[in-house]
Image (spheres, grey):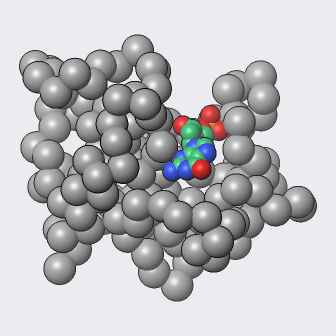
Amino acid sequence: MSETIFSKIIDGEIPSHKVYEDEYVYAFLDISQVTKGHTLLVPKKPSANIFETDEATMQHIGAALPKVANAIKKAFNPDGLNIIQNNGEFADQSVFHLHFHLLPRYENDTDGFGYHWETHEDTIDDDMKAQLAKEIANQFN
Ligand code: DGP
């Protein structure tokens, strides 16, 4: 498959706000911050989407998902968390490297984040994203 922006992020060619990494997976803040702490978990081994992903890769993702979800929970104490994964353009997939959205949800949103799948890319600046990522990453220590 052709290389996507996520391979470049994993390789460090494009900067990202990393929250977790192991031999097989990489997790970083989604640029759009639909909600505070919105994170993407991706396998390092590229595959376009769920239809093209091997079992071992899904085992690595499966092992990492609760770790990252719990780190977000500890960092921000959300009221809930959605895990969303889109496959194919018709299903709103825009980057063709398998990825899982971890979307913390807040009942009484006070930070200006909402859940209407609205981007906050322009309102959440880079310093704030760095701070959010650090708060999640710190939970793995
Ligand atoms: P999807 O629609 O499920 O394919 O989601 C792709 C997500 O990837 C979308 O929420 C925005 C995010 N995204 C796209 N480009 C970048 C990038 O360069 N950096 C980061 N951190 N996220 C990105």
In the rendered image, is residue 61 in sight? no
Looking at the picture, how far across and down is residue 11, in whole percent? 63, 76
Looking at the picture, how far across and down is residue 122, in whole percent? 43, 31
Looking at the picture, how far across and down is residue 78, in whole percent? 16, 37
Q: Quadrant of the N terminus?
A: bottom right
For residue 57, which quarter of the picture?
Answer: bottom right
Q: How many marks?
A: 0
Q: Residue furthest right?
A: 1
Looking at the picture, how far across and down is residue 136, in whole percent? 23, 60
In the rendered view, tell whether residue 37 sits above or below residue 56. above
For residue 74, which quarter of the picture?
Answer: bottom left
Residue shown at the point (46%, 26%) measured from the top left: 119
Residue shown at the point (52%, 84%) measured from the top left: 23
Q: Residue furthest top?
A: 116
For residue 130, which quarter of the picture?
Answer: bottom left
Left or right: residue 37 compared with residue 89: left
Left or right: residue 87 compared with residue 133: right
Left or right: residue 117 compared with residue 94: left
- In this rendered view, identify the residue nearer to me: 28 or 83: 28
- In this rendered view, identify the residue nearer to me: 13 or 39: 13
Q: Quadrant of ligand 1?
A: top right
- In this rendered view, identify the residue nearer to me: 115 or 132: 132
Residue shown at the point (38%, 70%) measured from the top left: 20
Residue shown at the point (35%, 29%) measured from the top left: 123
In the rendered image, is residue 122 in sight? yes
In the rendered view, tell whether residue 97 sits above or below residue 14. above
In the rendered view, tell whether residue 124 sits above or below residue 141. above
Q: Quadrant of the C terminus?
A: bottom left
In the rendered view, tell whether residue 8 sits above or below residue 132. below
